[in-house]
Image (cartoon, rainbow, N blue to C red):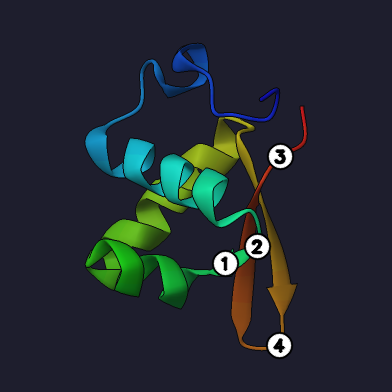
Amino acid sequence: KQDDVSTAELKGLNERQKEIMILLQKSNVALTQTDIQRELNMPKAAVSRNIRRLELKGLIEKERIGMSNLIRLKKS
């Protein structure tokens, strides 16, 4: 389907960033950083760092809700 993460989008991403992108795509809803951390069993710092990089690349968007960030794939 059209909103699948394309191979082109995954090009140039590290393994963790790819995992985050694929998880977000499969979940189909916005996830918190804690969800991502738990699902992928990744250290908190690694999740934050990789999410920041994905955000800079314009692949995801972050929405601050209270104390958490909701992370979702950016609509292309």
Question: What number of labels is visible?
Answer: 4
* Label 1 or label 3, whichever comes before in sequence order: 1
Q: Are marks 2 and 1 in contact (CB under 8 Å)?
A: yes
The kind of residue tagged 1 is Leu
Residue 23: x %, y % from top left: 44, 50
Q: Mark 3 points at which residue?
A: 74
Disc 4 to disc 2, C-alpha distance: 15 Å
Picture coordinates of residue 18 (x, y %)?
36, 36
Image position, residue 4 (x, y; %): 59, 29
Kind of residue at badge 3 = Lys
Residue, far top: 8
Q: Find the distance from the CA under tag 4 to the CA under tag 1.
A: 14 Å
Q: Residue at x 33, y 67 (%)?
A: 39
The answer to the question of whether label 4 and label 2 lie on touching residues, with beta carbons closer than 8 A, is no
- Name the residue tied to disc 1: 31
Q: Which residue is drawn at 22% across and 67% down?
A: 41
Residue type, numbered disc 4: Gly
Q: Which quadrant would the C terminus be assigned to in this image?
A: top right
Front position among marks 3 and 4? 3
CA separation in Å, label 2 and label 1: 4 Å
Q: Is residue 67 above or below residue 29?
A: below
Q: Name the residue under label 2.
A: 30
* Dot in front, 4 or 2: 2
User: Could you tell me how far apart the alpha carbons at marks 1 and 3 are, in whole angstroms?
Assistant: 13 Å
Q: Which of marks 4 and 1 is nearer the N terminus?
A: 1
Give the Cα separation between the discs numbered 2 and 3.
10 Å
Judged from this view, the residue extending furthest toward the right is 75
Name the kind of residue labelled 2 in the image. Answer: Ala
